[in-house]
Image (cartoon, grey):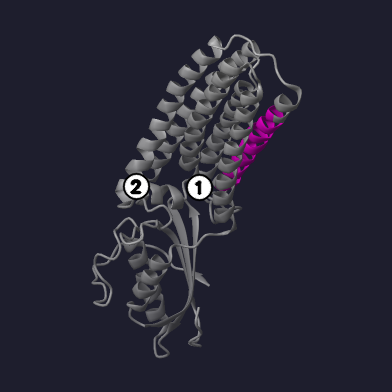
């Protein structure tokens, strides 16, 4: 299999049977809103990573301060829900630290030992972050909730807890606003809805911040309801139930984030409409008869790989095959800026379906 070198973009026309508006230059199909490996032109990759880093830093700073305040309030008030929320914030802080590691390490360029780059390492650390959310937050919340329901608890003065919850709500809201601003900006740039972008984006760092901050606001509301129920009834059952519900919430977040990162680690292809467009672009290159097999792989939020077994015309010379490979790569990179590597393997025409 040969890797064709890139070069100057040629002037060419697309085949008439492919709609000119079928795909935007950033790799986004309007009709389905899926992203072609993140969709950002390469010149904007550094800026996008900077936005992601800023979003994660804001979330980490907010969660660290909130975790300490919740722990103090939980001890003073004796509220298991507040202690669960403290564990929630600690887990979120650890998650953000791991996401920062992911952003830093995945930015390393390709080298001899890592010829395909370090993009996938982002998902390894993001997966560990999802595990931290499960172990550090959900497990503790379940334990504390069950312990409170079985053993009961002595409720102290809830005033400190209410103040901490109010301050935490404001700080979490600021952090969530930062993540939402970036996500909505990306969604507008891709021409898709915010919900669809968040579901399909390969930038799992921003997805984690948005989901965890959203869960944090819901968790704060649950903790407040648990405190209020205990204050009105004098029973710790409300607080224990609130702690269990916080555990369920964290379990859901950990599962969604873990599944997203596992899918990308195992290997997620570019969306089907994008793959079909790649086939059309390759077939339109002179001397290429057919695309026998096509493999695409999302390597990171803004990078994808394309490999194909291609049947060239039997009468084409070696020089013409080389020129066709070079032209094919330039056409793909022009149409899909997210494609970083193109591998074309000249293969006898077996006409096998791929």
- Say which residue appears at 42% left-offset and 64% top-offset: 5
**Earlier-in-chain disc, 1 versus 2:** 1
The image shows residue 328, relative to residue 152, as above or below, that is below
From the top left corner, tell me how far across and down residue 312 is, in percent: 42, 83
Residue at horizontal 47 percent and vertical 34 percent from the top = 214
Q: Name the main secondary structure of what is drawn in magenta.
A: helix
Checking the image for residue 187, the label placed there is 2
Tell me the mark number nearer the camera, choosing from 1 and 2.
2
Answer above or below: position of 140 versus 79.
below
Q: Is residue 326 visible?
A: no
> Where is residue 110 shown, x and y percent of the image?
52, 51
Q: Give the Cα distance between marks 1 and 2.
A: 27 Å
Of residues 100 and 286, the one drawn nearer to the viewer in this rendering: 100
How far across and how far down the image is residue 176, in percent? 42, 32
Q: Residues within 10 Å of mark 2 (few under 14, many from 20)?
A: many
Above or below, 128 against 315 in this view is above
What residue did someone put label 1 on?
Answer: 109
Residue 329, how many percent across, how many down? Answer: 38, 67
**Regarding mark 2 in the picture, which secondary structure is present there?**
helix
Q: Residues in magenta? A: 123-145
Which residue is located at x 45 percent, y 83 percent?
311
Q: Considering depth in this image, is 268 or 63 the residue closer to the camera?
A: 63
> Viewer-proximal residue, 295 or 313?
295
Q: Residue at x 61, y 25 (%)?
A: 238
Image mark count? 2
Q: Quadrant of residue 26?
A: bottom left
């Amino acid at each position: 299999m040969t890797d064709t070198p890139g070069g100057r973009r040629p002037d060419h026309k697309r085949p008439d049977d492919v709609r000119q508006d079928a795909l935007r230059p950033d790799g986004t199909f309007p009709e389905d809103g899926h992203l072609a490996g993140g969709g950002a032109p390469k010149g904007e990759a550094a800026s996008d990573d900077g936005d992601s880093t800023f979003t994660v830093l804001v979330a980490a700073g907010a969660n660290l301060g909130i975790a300490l305040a919740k722990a103090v309030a939980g001890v003073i008030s004796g509220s298991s829900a507040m202690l669960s929320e403290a564990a929630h914030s600690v887990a979120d802080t650890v998650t953000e630290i791991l996401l920062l590691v992911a952003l830093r390490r995945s930015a390393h360029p390709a080298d001899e030992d890592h010829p395909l780059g370090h993009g996938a390492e982002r998902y390894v650390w993001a997966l560990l972050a999802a595990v931290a959310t499960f172990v550090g937050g959900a497990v503790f919340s379940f334990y504390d909730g069950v312990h409170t329901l079985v053993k009961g608890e002595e409720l102290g003065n809830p005033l400190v807890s209410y103040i901490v919850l109010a301050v935490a709500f404001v700080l979490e809201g600021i952090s969530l606003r930062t993540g939402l601003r970036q996500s909505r900006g990306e969604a507008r740039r891709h021409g898709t809805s915010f919900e669809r972008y968040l579901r399909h984006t390969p930038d799992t760092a921003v997805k984690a911040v948005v989901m965890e901050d959203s869960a944090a606001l819901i968790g704060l509301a649950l903790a407040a309801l648990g405190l209020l129920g205990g204050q009105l009834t004098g029973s710790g059952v409300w607080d224990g139930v609130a702690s269990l519900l916080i555990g369920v919430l964290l379990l859901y977040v950990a599962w969604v984030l873990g599944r997203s990162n596992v899918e990308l680690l195992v290997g997620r292809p570019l969306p089907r409409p994008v793959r079909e467009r790649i086939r059309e672009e390759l077939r339109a290159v002179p001397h290429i008869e057919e695309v026998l097999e096509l493999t695409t792989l999302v390597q990171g939020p803004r990078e994808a790989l394309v490999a194909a077994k291609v049947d060239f015309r039997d009468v084409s010379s070696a020089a013409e095959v080389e020129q066709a490979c070079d032209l094919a790569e330039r056409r793909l990179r022009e149409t899909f800026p997210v494609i970083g590597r193109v591998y074309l393997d000249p293969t006898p025409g077996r006409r096998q379906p791929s």
